[in-house]
Image: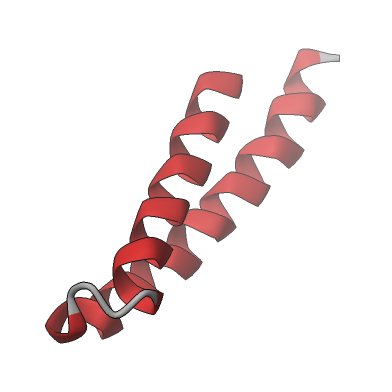
Amino acid sequence: MLRYTIIFIVLAIIAAFFGFGGIAAGAASIAKILFFIFIILFVLSLIFGKRFKA
């Protein structure tokens, strides 16, 4: 479960880098949506990962 948490946060950072940094201006809105989706998945995996592990 921790592996998915790491994957989600890395994908969120990559989406933020491309979307917020101005590198791919055409894909900024898609990157922002992906950023928030991956942040939500990251938080959920942290919550449920600790719940089921204990």
Q: Is residue 12 above or below residue 51?
A: below
Q: Position of residue 5 (x, y in %)?
A: 56, 33
**Residue 1 visible to an observer of this rendering:** no
Q: Position of residue 30 (x, y in %)?
A: 25, 76
Residue under the image location 37 percent in, 74 percent down: 21
Q: Is residue 51 above or below residue 10?
A: above
Q: Position of residue 16 (x, y in %)?
A: 42, 65
Residue at the right extreme, as displayed: 54
In this rendering, the count of numbered labels is 0
Residue under the image location 45 percent in, 41 percent down: 10
Residue at the left extreme, as displayed: 26
Q: Is residue 51 above or below residue 14?
A: above
Q: Say left or right for 29 vs 40.
A: left
Q: Is residue 3 above or below residue 41?
A: above
Quadrant assignment for the C terminus:
top right
Quadrant assignment for the N terminus:
top right
**Residue 2 visible to an observer of this rendering:** yes
**The one of 31 and 48 positioned closer to us in this rendering:** 31
Q: Say left or right for 42 vs 10.
A: right
Image quadrant assignment for residue 28 = bottom left
**The one of 21 and 39 positioned closer to us in this rendering:** 21
**The one of 47 and 16 positioned closer to us in this rendering:** 16
Residue under the image location 57 percent in, 59 percent down: 40
Q: Position of residue 49 (x, y in %)?
A: 69, 27
Residue under the image location 46 percent in, 53 percent down: 13
